[in-house]
Amino acid sequence: MRHFPTLVSEEAADYVGRVRVLSPEVAHRIAAGEVIERPASAVKELIENSLDAGAGRVEVEIEDGGVALIRVSDDGSGMSPEDAGRAVTEHATSKIRTADDLASVISLGFRGEALHAIGAVSSMTLTTRRRGTEGSLGARVRVFAGEVVESATASHPPGTTVEARDLFLNLPVRRGFLGTVRAEANAVATVVESLALSRPEVGFFLRSDGRRSLALPAAADLRERISQVHGLSLARSLVALGDPVVWGFVSPLAISFPTRRYLHVAVNGRVVEADSFAPAVARAYADLLPKGRHPAAFLRLELGPGEVDVNVHPAKSAVRLRGGRSAYPLVVGTIRSALAQEQEIGGGAPPEEGGAGLTLIGQFAGRCIIAQEGDELIVLDQHGAHERILYERLSRNPRAEATTLPSPVVARLPEDLAPEVWNFEVEMQALGFRFEPFGEGAVRISGVPETVTDPETALLAALHALAGGEDLAKALACKGSTRFGENLSKEEMEALLKEWSETTFREICPHGRPIVKRLTLVDLLREFGRI
């Protein structure tokens, strides 16, 4: 038996040309490298096989980050001796039979590569017994560096155990690219947590170097599983998504994080790369969180099998949706709707009479509006409140009628924007800007949207947003709103209060900063020692 077969077949030795057909051994190692990148990849593939087998409990054990040992045991359906022997061969699968089946894959595995790939780069033992065969022995198949070295009967409870030792024993270069033992062990734990989040009804357990590092018993639902993985505090705070196609949980506006650690997406039960949906989640929170902050989102998309192409990458961690990004608007809309309802439940909704519950008290330092709402004292950032009003107005209808200026204003254009002004002339006209050339690098503005108070600043902000692909409504709202230090009349303050109270997300400016502080009568009395 050759443990490390030659890389080029002997039959090809006499060929003197440059293009050669790779030997099966080399081709198998290349394929194995695509599927099994690191120990965590092997763990993922094995757990997915367990889930496809209907396991209710999955136990994972690793040593030295998974390089020395990976053992995955389940109580699933198990295999017959014949199926066990065939399962370790190339492209052997029970999930599909014809090419047409690829259009409607509902299982996690289907390519028939995982067991063969793991066996090609390790010393692997598969032990299994089919469920419902009490009193019978199971089967054991041993594979070393891609060659079957043993096939025998063995004692085993119903289910399957796959044990891989000395991972990448014949690929020392791949071992050199692995991280530290701790890094690889953490990667395995992340994979187990991620798959556990996709199947709350299954128990997952992980031991690393003899110590229990994860214990996630079967949970009643997704919220309970999130509590097990990320803590009760986060799980309790999450807002539920109620759409039958896009459901799950997202964090409320009061909770955000410096990274996307809490972004988890599963499509038809398959964990996919969260980064592919990160833009949709970011768009849903675009005007609600401060720059550099990210929400938690545990999304579940339930689509018809024909709507999802899972045969995109050997690792099966990417999917292609029919219609490209057509699901993104649904994700954005579902999250926005849930957040709006959360605002209403949380007391951030406008009064039924559209501001009738707000009583103006006055203005403080030209920066804040003081009002009363019920038994609460309201301190409102007037600039942020006006930004929110304009942003939601512009988001609903970005087109506006131009307001003619009493006297035209000349705007000097930076060198990088001078050519752009004419590239975006149609868009600027639709926004309500009217302008004409005024010498080199300048335009004369004769009309602006009705919300604009500083024509030159607003025009430059709109151009910057259009040229950079930024949020145009946010840019115009910021430059068109009242400024700090600007004194308002009583009528202007009352009008601002009324419009602000009717906005959807009235607690937060379009940049994600809070715009209102509340002080209850009880708080005030406590400060004065009256209670």
Image: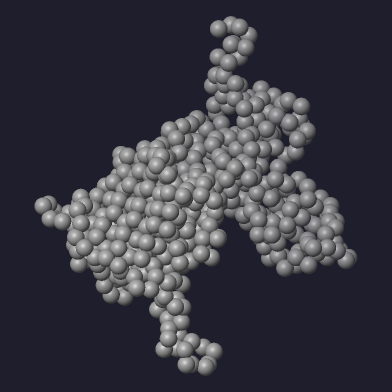
Question: Does residue 177 appear in the picture of this structure?
Answer: yes
Quarter of the figure with the C terminus: top right
The extreme left residue here reads 135
**Is residue 253 rendered to the left or right of residue 156?**
right
Q: Position of residue 191 (x, y in %)?
A: 43, 51
Q: Which is nearer the eye, 446 or 394?
A: 394
Q: Is residue 518 above or below residue 391?
A: above
Q: Which is nearer the eye, 195 or 140?
A: 140
Quarter of the figure with the N terminus: bottom left
Q: Is residue 49 above or below residue 372?
A: below
Q: Position of residue 117 (x, y in %)?
A: 39, 66
Residue 291 occupies quadrant: top right
Residue 293 occupies quadrant: top right
Q: Position of residue 256 (x, y in %)?
A: 56, 39
The extreme top residue here reads 530
Q: Residue at x 54, y 26 (%)?
A: 357
Q: Residue at x 46, y 32 (%)?
A: 233
